Image (spheres, rainbow, N blue to C red):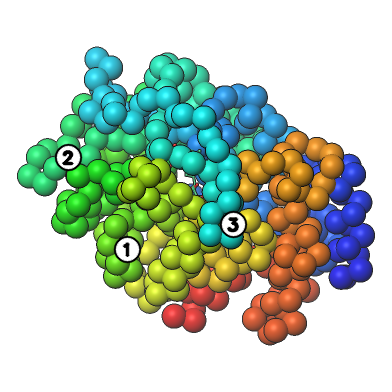
Amino acid sequence: MRAQLATDFERFKQRALPRDFPSDVREAYGIDLTGRYLGTTIPHPIGKGSGQLSLNQGQLEVDAEAGLAFAVLKTVIAQDAGGAQSMAAWAIHEAKMKVERRGGGWTVTWKGRGWDRSFEEYLALARVGGDLTRDGHLLVVPSVKYHLPRLGEPFKDSEYAFTTRALATAWGEPLLLLEKDFSPTLAGDALAGEQEQILRWLREVPVHIRAQAAVRLAVKVMNARFDDDFQLEMVRAAAGADALVVFNRLFDAAQGVAYGGPELSERNLRVLGQLTPGATPGIPELSGTGGISSGRMILEYARRGCESVQLHTYFQLPLDEYAATDGSRTQRALHQLVFDPVDGLIAGMLELETQGVLERRGGELHFLDLAANAHHAR
Ligand SMILES: Cc1cc2nc3c(=O)[nH]c(=O)nc-3n(C[C@H](O)[C@H](O)[C@H](O)COP(=O)(O)O)c2cc1C
Protein backbone atom coordinates (compact mmCIF):
# COMPACT_ATOMS: atom_id res chain seq x y z
CA MET A 1 0.00 0.00 0.00
CA ARG A 2 2.87 2.34 0.72
CA ALA A 3 4.33 1.71 -2.74
CA GLN A 4 0.90 2.35 -4.22
CA LEU A 5 0.65 5.59 -2.24
CA ALA A 6 3.97 6.82 -3.62
CA THR A 7 2.72 6.00 -7.13
CA ASP A 8 -0.63 7.73 -6.65
CA PHE A 9 1.05 10.80 -5.19
CA GLU A 10 3.27 11.07 -8.28
CA ARG A 11 0.45 10.29 -10.70
CA PHE A 12 -1.88 12.99 -9.37
CA LYS A 13 0.93 15.56 -9.31
CA GLN A 14 0.77 15.96 -13.04
CA ARG A 15 -2.92 15.58 -13.61
CA ALA A 16 -5.64 17.25 -11.60
CA LEU A 17 -7.01 15.22 -8.70
CA PRO A 18 -10.37 13.64 -9.65
CA ARG A 19 -13.41 15.05 -7.86
CA ASP A 20 -14.42 11.67 -6.45
CA PHE A 21 -10.99 10.80 -5.07
CA PRO A 22 -12.59 9.42 -1.85
CA SER A 23 -13.94 6.47 -3.92
CA ASP A 24 -10.46 5.77 -5.27
CA VAL A 25 -9.05 5.89 -1.75
CA ARG A 26 -11.68 3.47 -0.55
CA GLU A 27 -11.02 1.03 -3.36
CA ALA A 28 -7.23 1.19 -3.33
CA TYR A 29 -6.56 1.40 0.41
CA GLY A 30 -9.73 0.20 2.11
CA ILE A 31 -9.95 3.61 3.77
CA ASP A 32 -13.31 5.30 4.30
CA LEU A 33 -12.64 9.04 4.55
CA THR A 34 -16.28 9.95 5.34
CA GLY A 35 -16.62 12.91 7.70
CA ARG A 36 -19.50 14.94 9.11
CA TYR A 37 -20.30 18.64 9.31
CA LEU A 38 -23.45 20.08 10.84
CA GLY A 39 -25.08 16.67 10.89
CA THR A 40 -24.43 16.17 7.18
CA THR A 41 -22.34 13.28 5.93
CA ILE A 42 -19.50 14.49 3.73
CA PRO A 43 -17.21 12.36 1.51
CA HIS A 44 -14.07 13.40 3.44
CA PRO A 45 -13.44 15.77 6.34
CA ILE A 46 -11.69 18.69 4.58
CA GLY A 47 -13.53 21.99 4.15
CA LYS A 48 -12.64 25.64 3.72
CA GLY A 49 -13.00 28.01 6.68
CA SER A 50 -14.83 31.30 6.33
CA GLY A 51 -12.79 34.04 4.67
CA GLN A 52 -11.44 35.60 1.52
CA LEU A 53 -11.54 32.29 -0.37
CA SER A 54 -15.36 32.09 -0.47
CA LEU A 55 -16.48 35.52 -1.61
CA ASN A 56 -18.07 34.71 -4.95
CA GLN A 57 -19.74 32.07 -7.09
CA GLY A 58 -16.61 31.44 -9.15
CA GLN A 59 -14.62 30.38 -6.10
CA LEU A 60 -17.41 28.03 -4.99
CA GLU A 61 -17.60 26.43 -8.43
CA VAL A 62 -13.85 25.77 -8.53
CA ASP A 63 -14.11 24.19 -5.06
CA ALA A 64 -17.07 22.05 -6.09
CA GLU A 65 -15.11 20.87 -9.11
CA ALA A 66 -12.15 19.99 -6.88
CA GLY A 67 -14.33 17.86 -4.62
CA LEU A 68 -13.86 19.98 -1.50
CA ALA A 69 -16.18 18.66 1.23
CA PHE A 70 -17.65 22.04 2.25
CA ALA A 71 -17.03 25.78 2.13
CA VAL A 72 -18.02 28.39 4.71
CA LEU A 73 -18.85 31.76 3.17
CA LYS A 74 -17.13 34.97 4.28
CA THR A 75 -18.76 36.38 7.42
CA VAL A 76 -21.51 38.92 6.80
CA ILE A 77 -22.36 41.54 9.43
CA ALA A 78 -26.00 41.28 10.53
CA GLN A 79 -28.38 44.16 9.86
CA ASP A 80 -31.98 45.10 10.60
CA ALA A 81 -34.69 45.84 8.03
CA GLY A 82 -33.52 49.45 7.77
CA GLY A 83 -29.94 48.39 7.08
CA ALA A 84 -28.58 49.37 10.52
CA GLN A 85 -25.62 47.26 11.72
CA SER A 86 -24.57 47.47 15.36
CA MET A 87 -21.34 45.64 14.41
CA ALA A 88 -20.70 47.99 11.47
CA ALA A 89 -17.10 48.50 12.57
CA TRP A 90 -16.37 45.03 11.15
CA ALA A 91 -18.04 45.58 7.77
CA ILE A 92 -15.04 47.29 6.22
CA HIS A 93 -12.61 46.31 3.56
CA GLU A 94 -9.76 43.99 4.53
CA ALA A 95 -6.33 45.37 3.66
CA LYS A 96 -4.27 43.33 1.23
CA MET A 97 -3.46 39.91 2.68
CA LYS A 98 0.10 38.89 3.36
CA VAL A 99 1.00 35.20 3.50
CA GLU A 100 4.04 34.81 5.74
CA ARG A 101 5.86 32.46 8.06
CA ARG A 102 5.24 32.66 11.78
CA GLY A 103 6.50 30.25 14.46
CA GLY A 104 7.74 27.73 11.89
CA GLY A 105 4.46 27.59 9.94
CA TRP A 106 2.41 29.78 7.66
CA THR A 107 -0.04 32.48 8.61
CA VAL A 108 -2.04 35.10 6.72
CA THR A 109 -2.49 38.58 8.09
CA TRP A 110 -6.12 39.10 8.96
CA LYS A 111 -7.60 42.07 10.77
CA GLY A 112 -10.85 40.21 11.29
CA ARG A 113 -13.09 42.16 8.95
CA GLY A 114 -16.34 40.89 7.48
CA TRP A 115 -18.20 41.09 4.16
CA ASP A 116 -17.83 44.63 2.74
CA ARG A 117 -20.37 44.54 -0.11
CA SER A 118 -24.16 44.88 0.13
CA PHE A 119 -26.37 42.45 2.03
CA GLU A 120 -28.29 41.80 -1.21
CA GLU A 121 -25.09 40.56 -2.82
CA TYR A 122 -24.53 38.24 0.13
CA LEU A 123 -28.05 36.87 -0.22
CA ALA A 124 -27.37 36.16 -3.90
CA LEU A 125 -24.29 34.18 -2.88
CA ALA A 126 -26.27 32.31 -0.21
CA ARG A 127 -28.81 31.41 -2.94
CA VAL A 128 -26.01 29.93 -5.04
CA GLY A 129 -24.79 28.09 -1.92
CA GLY A 130 -28.22 26.58 -1.31
CA ASP A 131 -28.35 25.35 -4.92
CA LEU A 132 -24.86 23.83 -4.82
CA THR A 133 -25.72 22.09 -1.55
CA ARG A 134 -29.05 20.70 -2.79
CA ASP A 135 -27.42 19.49 -6.01
CA GLY A 136 -24.80 17.61 -3.99
CA HIS A 137 -21.94 19.59 -5.55
CA LEU A 138 -20.62 21.34 -2.46
CA LEU A 139 -21.95 21.89 1.05
CA VAL A 140 -21.99 25.68 1.49
CA VAL A 141 -22.51 27.36 4.85
CA PRO A 142 -23.14 31.12 5.30
CA SER A 143 -21.48 32.81 8.29
CA VAL A 144 -22.84 35.76 10.29
CA LYS A 145 -21.61 38.11 12.96
CA TYR A 146 -24.65 39.33 14.95
CA HIS A 147 -25.04 42.02 17.57
CA LEU A 148 -23.37 41.18 20.89
CA PRO A 149 -24.68 43.28 23.80
CA ARG A 150 -22.93 44.40 26.96
CA LEU A 151 -23.99 42.69 30.16
CA GLY A 152 -27.37 44.00 31.24
CA GLU A 153 -28.23 45.24 27.74
CA PRO A 154 -30.74 43.38 25.56
CA PHE A 155 -29.89 41.67 22.26
CA LYS A 156 -30.94 43.64 19.17
CA ASP A 157 -33.44 41.07 17.97
CA SER A 158 -34.35 43.20 14.96
CA GLU A 159 -30.93 42.34 13.48
CA TYR A 160 -31.24 38.66 14.38
CA ALA A 161 -34.71 38.56 12.82
CA PHE A 162 -34.05 40.35 9.55
CA THR A 163 -30.72 38.69 8.78
CA THR A 164 -31.65 35.13 9.77
CA ARG A 165 -34.99 35.14 7.97
CA ALA A 166 -33.55 36.68 4.81
CA LEU A 167 -30.79 34.09 4.72
CA ALA A 168 -33.20 31.22 5.36
CA THR A 169 -35.40 32.41 2.48
CA ALA A 170 -32.46 32.89 0.10
CA TRP A 171 -31.03 29.51 1.04
CA GLY A 172 -34.28 27.63 0.50
CA GLU A 173 -35.23 24.11 1.52
CA PRO A 174 -34.79 22.10 3.57
CA LEU A 175 -32.89 23.83 6.34
CA LEU A 176 -30.42 26.71 6.49
CA LEU A 177 -26.97 25.69 7.67
CA LEU A 178 -25.37 28.61 9.47
CA GLU A 179 -22.14 29.51 11.24
CA LYS A 180 -22.08 32.18 13.93
CA ASP A 181 -18.73 33.94 13.98
CA PHE A 182 -17.19 35.28 17.18
CA SER A 183 -14.20 36.79 15.46
CA PRO A 184 -10.86 36.91 17.20
CA THR A 185 -10.74 40.69 16.89
CA LEU A 186 -13.43 40.62 19.52
CA ALA A 187 -10.71 39.32 21.80
CA GLY A 188 -8.94 42.61 21.28
CA ASP A 189 -12.07 44.64 21.86
CA ALA A 190 -12.99 46.21 25.18
CA LEU A 191 -16.29 44.28 25.01
CA ALA A 192 -14.47 40.98 25.35
CA GLY A 193 -12.64 41.75 28.58
CA GLU A 194 -15.40 40.28 30.69
CA GLN A 195 -15.79 36.55 31.14
CA GLU A 196 -19.43 36.69 32.21
CA GLN A 197 -20.24 38.70 29.11
CA ILE A 198 -18.62 36.16 26.76
CA LEU A 199 -20.35 33.23 28.46
CA ARG A 200 -23.69 34.98 28.17
CA TRP A 201 -23.15 35.46 24.42
CA LEU A 202 -22.31 31.80 23.91
CA ARG A 203 -25.32 30.67 25.92
CA GLU A 204 -27.87 33.08 24.50
CA VAL A 205 -26.88 33.74 20.87
CA PRO A 206 -28.10 30.30 19.65
CA VAL A 207 -31.47 30.94 21.32
CA HIS A 208 -31.85 34.32 19.58
CA ILE A 209 -30.95 32.86 16.18
CA ARG A 210 -33.23 29.83 16.53
CA ALA A 211 -36.13 32.08 17.53
CA GLN A 212 -36.10 33.49 13.97
CA ALA A 213 -35.89 30.46 11.68
CA ALA A 214 -35.22 26.75 11.62
CA VAL A 215 -31.44 26.48 11.25
CA ARG A 216 -28.68 24.01 11.84
CA LEU A 217 -26.20 26.14 13.73
CA ALA A 218 -22.45 25.98 14.19
CA VAL A 219 -20.82 28.39 16.62
CA LYS A 220 -17.25 29.34 15.83
CA VAL A 221 -15.69 29.72 19.25
CA MET A 222 -13.03 32.40 19.51
CA ASN A 223 -9.75 32.02 21.33
CA ALA A 224 -10.35 34.33 24.28
CA ARG A 225 -7.55 36.12 26.06
CA PHE A 226 -7.97 33.92 29.14
CA ASP A 227 -6.55 30.55 30.17
CA ASP A 228 -7.37 27.01 28.99
CA ASP A 229 -9.97 26.49 31.72
CA PHE A 230 -11.96 29.45 30.51
CA GLN A 231 -11.70 28.15 26.94
CA LEU A 232 -13.33 24.91 28.17
CA GLU A 233 -15.97 26.88 29.99
CA MET A 234 -16.78 28.64 26.71
CA VAL A 235 -17.25 25.29 24.98
CA ARG A 236 -19.68 24.16 27.65
CA ALA A 237 -21.58 27.44 27.45
CA ALA A 238 -22.02 27.02 23.68
CA ALA A 239 -23.64 23.60 23.97
CA GLY A 240 -26.90 25.01 22.54
CA ALA A 241 -25.35 24.92 19.06
CA ASP A 242 -25.50 21.88 16.76
CA ALA A 243 -21.76 22.07 16.10
CA LEU A 244 -18.75 23.97 17.42
CA VAL A 245 -15.89 25.20 15.26
CA VAL A 246 -12.84 24.98 17.51
CA PHE A 247 -11.13 27.45 17.72
CA ASN A 248 -10.78 30.69 15.77
CA ARG A 249 -7.43 32.43 15.51
CA LEU A 250 -5.27 33.99 18.20
CA PHE A 251 -5.16 37.75 18.50
CA ASP A 252 -1.96 39.77 18.53
CA ALA A 253 -3.02 42.88 20.44
CA ALA A 254 0.24 44.73 19.73
CA GLN A 255 -0.15 44.40 15.95
CA GLY A 256 -3.95 44.38 15.98
CA VAL A 257 -4.12 41.26 13.79
CA ALA A 258 -5.44 37.73 14.11
CA TYR A 259 -2.84 35.04 13.48
CA GLY A 260 -2.50 31.31 13.10
CA GLY A 261 0.27 28.80 12.56
CA PRO A 262 1.70 26.26 15.02
CA GLU A 263 1.00 28.43 18.08
CA LEU A 264 -2.70 28.26 17.23
CA SER A 265 -2.85 24.51 16.56
CA GLU A 266 -0.86 23.79 19.75
CA ARG A 267 -3.27 25.74 21.90
CA ASN A 268 -6.33 24.31 20.16
CA LEU A 269 -5.14 20.72 20.48
CA ARG A 270 -4.15 21.23 24.11
CA VAL A 271 -7.61 22.55 25.00
CA LEU A 272 -9.44 19.91 22.94
CA GLY A 273 -7.36 17.25 24.68
CA GLN A 274 -8.98 18.30 27.94
CA LEU A 275 -12.48 18.17 26.56
CA THR A 276 -14.68 15.23 27.33
CA PRO A 277 -17.23 15.08 24.52
CA GLY A 278 -18.52 11.64 25.52
CA ALA A 279 -18.45 12.11 29.26
CA THR A 280 -19.68 15.69 29.32
CA PRO A 281 -23.27 15.54 28.18
CA GLY A 282 -24.30 17.93 25.48
CA ILE A 283 -20.96 18.76 23.84
CA PRO A 284 -22.04 19.10 20.20
CA GLU A 285 -20.28 17.87 17.08
CA LEU A 286 -16.81 19.41 16.66
CA SER A 287 -15.16 20.89 13.55
CA GLY A 288 -11.45 21.66 13.95
CA THR A 289 -9.77 24.80 12.66
CA GLY A 290 -6.35 26.37 13.07
CA GLY A 291 -2.86 25.73 11.79
CA ILE A 292 -3.76 22.65 9.74
CA SER A 293 -1.23 22.10 6.98
CA SER A 294 -1.02 18.31 6.68
CA GLY A 295 -3.12 15.16 6.83
CA ARG A 296 -1.29 14.31 10.03
CA MET A 297 -2.54 17.49 11.66
CA ILE A 298 -6.08 16.64 10.54
CA LEU A 299 -5.70 13.34 12.39
CA GLU A 300 -4.56 15.17 15.54
CA TYR A 301 -7.82 17.13 15.53
CA ALA A 302 -9.82 13.97 14.74
CA ARG A 303 -8.25 12.09 17.64
CA ARG A 304 -9.55 14.88 19.89
CA GLY A 305 -13.12 14.50 18.68
CA CYS A 306 -13.35 16.54 15.44
CA GLU A 307 -15.45 15.02 12.66
CA SER A 308 -14.42 17.62 10.07
CA VAL A 309 -11.80 20.36 9.66
CA GLN A 310 -11.87 23.87 8.16
CA LEU A 311 -8.66 25.22 6.66
CA HIS A 312 -7.94 28.66 5.35
CA THR A 313 -4.21 29.44 5.26
CA TYR A 314 -3.26 26.14 3.62
CA PHE A 315 -5.49 26.93 0.64
CA GLN A 316 -3.68 30.22 0.20
CA LEU A 317 0.01 29.24 0.00
CA PRO A 318 2.27 30.25 -2.89
CA LEU A 319 1.75 27.68 -5.68
CA ASP A 320 5.29 26.32 -5.45
CA GLU A 321 4.58 25.13 -1.88
CA TYR A 322 2.39 22.34 -3.29
CA ALA A 323 3.91 19.27 -4.91
CA ALA A 324 1.28 19.11 -7.67
CA THR A 325 1.92 21.07 -10.83
CA ASP A 326 -1.55 20.75 -12.33
CA GLY A 327 -5.05 21.57 -11.14
CA SER A 328 -6.61 24.40 -9.14
CA ARG A 329 -5.07 25.53 -5.86
CA THR A 330 -7.80 23.61 -4.04
CA GLN A 331 -7.00 20.42 -5.95
CA ARG A 332 -3.28 20.80 -5.28
CA ALA A 333 -3.88 21.35 -1.58
CA LEU A 334 -6.25 18.36 -1.32
CA HIS A 335 -3.76 16.20 -3.21
CA GLN A 336 -1.07 16.92 -0.66
CA LEU A 337 -3.30 16.71 2.41
CA VAL A 338 -4.62 13.31 1.37
CA PHE A 339 -1.89 11.60 -0.68
CA ASP A 340 1.44 12.89 0.69
CA PRO A 341 3.29 9.61 1.32
CA VAL A 342 4.75 10.85 4.62
CA ASP A 343 2.38 13.44 6.08
CA GLY A 344 -0.88 12.75 4.26
CA LEU A 345 -4.19 11.47 5.59
CA ILE A 346 -3.80 8.02 4.01
CA ALA A 347 -0.23 7.56 5.27
CA GLY A 348 -1.28 8.74 8.73
CA MET A 349 -4.28 6.41 8.93
CA LEU A 350 -2.20 3.41 7.80
CA GLU A 351 0.32 4.29 10.50
CA LEU A 352 -2.42 4.49 13.15
CA GLU A 353 -3.50 1.02 12.04
CA THR A 354 0.05 -0.30 12.49
CA GLN A 355 0.13 1.25 15.96
CA GLY A 356 -3.17 -0.41 16.87
CA VAL A 357 -4.90 2.95 17.37
CA LEU A 358 -7.30 2.36 14.46
CA GLU A 359 -8.78 -1.00 13.52
CA ARG A 360 -10.47 -2.18 10.35
CA ARG A 361 -14.19 -2.80 10.52
CA GLY A 362 -15.70 -4.68 7.61
CA GLY A 363 -12.21 -4.62 6.10
CA GLU A 364 -11.98 -0.82 6.17
CA LEU A 365 -10.40 1.91 8.24
CA HIS A 366 -12.93 4.65 8.99
CA PHE A 367 -11.89 8.26 9.57
CA LEU A 368 -14.91 8.88 11.80
CA ASP A 369 -13.83 6.07 14.15
CA LEU A 370 -11.08 8.38 15.40
CA ALA A 371 -13.53 10.93 16.77
CA ALA A 372 -15.81 8.15 18.06
CA ASN A 373 -12.84 6.56 19.88
CA ALA A 374 -11.92 9.94 21.35
CA HIS A 375 -15.39 10.16 22.82
CA HIS A 376 -15.25 6.62 24.24
CA ALA A 377 -11.77 6.98 25.67
CA ARG A 378 -12.82 9.81 27.90
C1 LIG B 1 -7.70 36.36 5.47
C2 LIG B 1 -8.59 35.63 6.41
C3 LIG B 1 -9.94 35.98 6.52
C4 LIG B 1 -10.78 35.31 7.40
N1 LIG B 1 -12.09 35.69 7.49
C5 LIG B 1 -12.91 35.05 8.37
C6 LIG B 1 -14.27 35.43 8.50
O1 LIG B 1 -14.77 36.33 7.80
N2 LIG B 1 -15.03 34.76 9.41
C7 LIG B 1 -14.54 33.75 10.19
O2 LIG B 1 -15.30 33.17 10.98
N3 LIG B 1 -13.26 33.35 10.08
C8 LIG B 1 -12.42 33.99 9.21
N4 LIG B 1 -11.11 33.58 9.11
C9 LIG B 1 -10.63 32.48 9.95
C10 LIG B 1 -10.53 31.18 9.14
O3 LIG B 1 -11.79 30.75 8.70
C11 LIG B 1 -9.88 30.04 9.96
O4 LIG B 1 -10.73 29.60 10.99
C12 LIG B 1 -8.59 30.46 10.62
O5 LIG B 1 -7.80 31.20 9.71
C13 LIG B 1 -7.79 29.26 11.13
O6 LIG B 1 -7.47 28.37 10.10
P1 LIG B 1 -6.05 28.38 9.33
O7 LIG B 1 -4.99 28.28 10.39
O8 LIG B 1 -6.12 27.17 8.43
O9 LIG B 1 -5.97 29.66 8.55
C14 LIG B 1 -10.26 34.25 8.22
C15 LIG B 1 -8.91 33.91 8.10
C16 LIG B 1 -8.08 34.57 7.22
C17 LIG B 1 -6.65 34.15 7.13
Give x and y (percent) for residue 131. 58, 28
Q: Is residue 362 above or below residue 141?
A: below
Residue at coordinates 57% horizontally, 24% vertically from top-left? 56
Q: Amino acid at mark 3?
A: Gly
- Name the residue that disc number 1 marks: 231
Give the mark nearer the N terminus: 1 vs 2.
Answer: 2
Q: Name the kind of residue labelled 1 in the image.
A: Gln
Give the structural element (helix, strand or loop) at label 2: loop
Residue type (three-letter) at the residue carrying disc 2 = Pro
Task: Name the residue at 75% across, 82% down.
Answer: 354
Mark 3 secondary-structure assignment = strand
Residue sitting at 46 percent across and 29 percent down? 95
Q: Which mark is residue 105?
A: 3
Question: Dot 1: what SS?
Answer: helix
Determine whether, in the image, residue 261 is placed left or right of residue 178.
right
Tell me the CA gap for discs 1 and 2. Answer: 20 Å
The residue furthest bottom is: 356
